[in-house]
Amino acid sequence: MIAASVPIQRAHHAKLLVIDKNAWIIHAPRSSFADFLRRFDIVVANDAATLPASLAGFHAPTGEALEVRLAGSRSLDGDDVSHFVAIVFGPGDFRTRTENRLLPPRLRRGDRLALGPLCAIVERTLDHPRLVALRFEGSSASIWEGISQHGRPIQYAHVHTPLALWDVWTPIAGAPFAFEPPSAGFMLDWKTVASIREHGADFATITHAAGISSTGDDALDRRLPFDERYRISAATAHALCRAKNNGGRIVAVGTTVVRALEHSALINGTVRAGAGIATQRIGAATPLRVVDAIVSGTHEPGTSHYELLRAFVDDATLRRAADELDARDYRTHEFGDSIFIERRLRCAARAKPAERLLAA
Amino acid sequence: MDTSYPIEIRHDILRGVRVAITGGTSGLGLALVRECSARGAIVAFVARTRERVERVVREIAGSHGIVGDVAKKEDIHPIALQILARLGGVDVLVNNASSLGPTPLVLLADTECEAFEDALATNVLGPFRLTKALLGALAASARDGRGACVVNVSSDAAINPYPTWGAYGTSKAALHHMTRIWNEELIDEGVSFISVDPGDMDTPLHALAVPDADASALKRPETSAREVVDRIEQALTDSGRTAVDASAMNLQNLADVA
Ligand SMILES: NC(=O)c1ccc[n+]([C@@H]2O[C@H](COP(=O)([O-])OP(=O)(O)OC[C@H]3O[C@@H](n4cnc5c(N)ncnc54)[C@H](OP(=O)(O)O)[C@@H]3O)[C@@H](O)[C@H]2O)c1
């Protein structure tokens, strides 16, 4: 596949590869997404706005330059913004592939990191030279101001120009809790939302703190995705329930939505309103209890995103789809084209509760 | 003004509502910050001058001050991000910050292009950009039954062609019309848009425009603020604000799920 290297969220020529429930593959313009919906379906998107989570600065004890990428937070409460888990790179920026980024200087507990107007203290080193728990000094007001003015969106080398906040701000963006953009939502503009309703389907959102998708370090990447916080409103939980009762399908926009909804349903099989922390991994062996279909970017085998797609459809079909994506010049990565996968019929068969929990 | 609501109920409508106000350190904006806070709203406000922002934060307990310039493209997302982070979302946006264009006021034919652009940047593009950046959160509030509305502060100069008010009047006319289009387009999303003319008020902006005006003949900004906030309450009620505090419902479940 071709890497989408220009930060345009909704390219006019964007494509959609559809895998229906019989594993048939269909190609369509992405703008016709709503045509694949039916009455009573519900489309659920992640409305987390993206933090400018990349903070350049230096390590005060050695004076060495570094880049901090915020990767996890203690809560979704705007007043509790001092504590983060972060991945730290040595000198350099997004122009170097993460795989080739230098290690930061040896970080020790209590080290100060000067990050523009912000000052962070290493509270704990975690079990990897790049991974630390940080605490920002100052009031929550000054921390938010510092992050919003000094931070840049986390960016990878395949996009060549520096990203601005508006490049990653989805039309539906709300509270800023995502560390990387919930990019499947790039496809949603207000016209699409209206057209979802015109097809008799519903539209709802959850807020999920989408984490870092890649660190370039094998040991760390194997641990992705990190735990991610989410919040589901009473109205969304209610709308999901209504859709299910009416025989509609639950269509998740992005892997983060799948993760949140499936996590929320672990307790009793239905999505509940409230906050939670998605800790589970979703893969080929995970029975999906809530989500019937996913719209997502195109992902390379081996990534955690790709693993999640295996919960929807068998490997042979995914391989067939991958061949088609290649053959038809689909563009990959966050600004690329999309796929729409309806869960295979056989996967829809419900496992017994105990098996479900074990598999998750 | 609609007075059919008993006072107690009216004053409950704003409790817990998350309101963002641009230009909150002077005149109408400051009066709006005070009035909304007094009625129980959680308020974030924006203005350019840090000292004045800090002064208002000290005066109004619980208010959230944000330093930023709505006329600057680069400031909009940092402003939006801080509003959303500090309030946890937003239910009401008031685009109140405004530029007169060239002062002292001059004939349109004598208006420098840059001064004209300046008025458009503050009074039209700024509100457009900020509304767009906050629209996802506003629509989410509407879906959650909290109600959502955007108030754009216009002027009678948007309707009447007063000589020497060219840059200002043109920009306010654009803002007024934009408000009506937003309202038509977003009705199905549950976000309502209101354009309000606060009347001639005794504020620094008015003094700058009409230095020799008789201040005693002008409206007090507090009076206009009460009227504007009444309209906001009405809009929230009309848009079906059902949950007095929808976030409280979510929090109830937090303990069992987390
Ligand atoms: N006063 C009247 O008679 C009258 C009549 C009709 C309509 N209006 C409208 O009512 C609204 C309020 O006017 P007012 O008389 O209360 O004005 P004001 O007393 O001059 O207050 C303006 C406020 O906006 C802030 N501000 C100005 N430009 C800004 C920018 N680019 N970005 C962020 N904040 C900015 C100012 O603080 P900083 O300077 O520190 O940024 C201040 O807090 C305006 O929309 C005005 O057009 C007024």
Image (tube, helix red, strand yellow):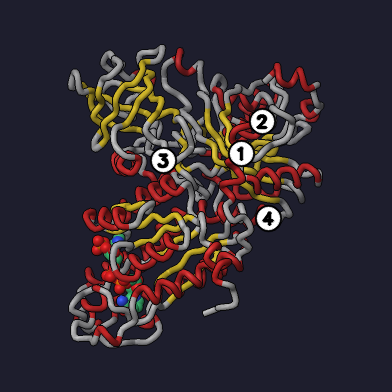
Q: Amino acid at mark 3?
A: Asp
Are the numbered discs 1 and 2 placed on the same chain, yes or no?
A: yes
How crowded pointer 3 is (Cα within 10 Å; few <14, some 14-19, many 20+) is rated as some
User: Which of the two marks, 4 or 3, is nearer to us in this view?
Assistant: 3
Residue A244 seen in the current view: yes
Give how far apart the Cα atoms at labels 1 and 2 are: 14 Å
How crowded pointer 4 is (Cα within 10 Å; few <14, some 14-19, many 20+) is rated as some
Give how far apart the Cα atoms at labels 4 and 1 are: 25 Å
Q: Quadrant of residue B130?
A: bottom left
Q: Label 1's element?
A: strand
Q: Give the chain of mark 2.
A: A
User: Which of the two marks, 2 or 4, is nearer to us in this view?
Assistant: 2
Answer with mark 4 or mark 3, whichever residue precedes in sequence: 3
Q: Give the chain of mark 3.
A: A
The residue tagged 2 is: A262
Residue A162 seen in the current view: no
Q: Which residue is located at x 27 percent, y 75 percent? A: B203
Mark 2 and mark 4 residues within 8 Å of each other at the beta carbon: no
Answer with mark 2 or mark 4, whichever residue precedes in sequence: 4
User: Considering depth in this image, is A285 or B213 the residue closer to the camera?
Assistant: B213
The residue tagged 3 is: A79
Give how far apart the Cα atoms at labels 1 and 3 are: 18 Å
The residue tagged 4 is: A197
Residue B191, image x and y in percent?
55, 62
Residue B44, image x and y in percent?
39, 55
The residue tagged 1 is: A274
Q: Amino acid at mark 2?
A: Glu
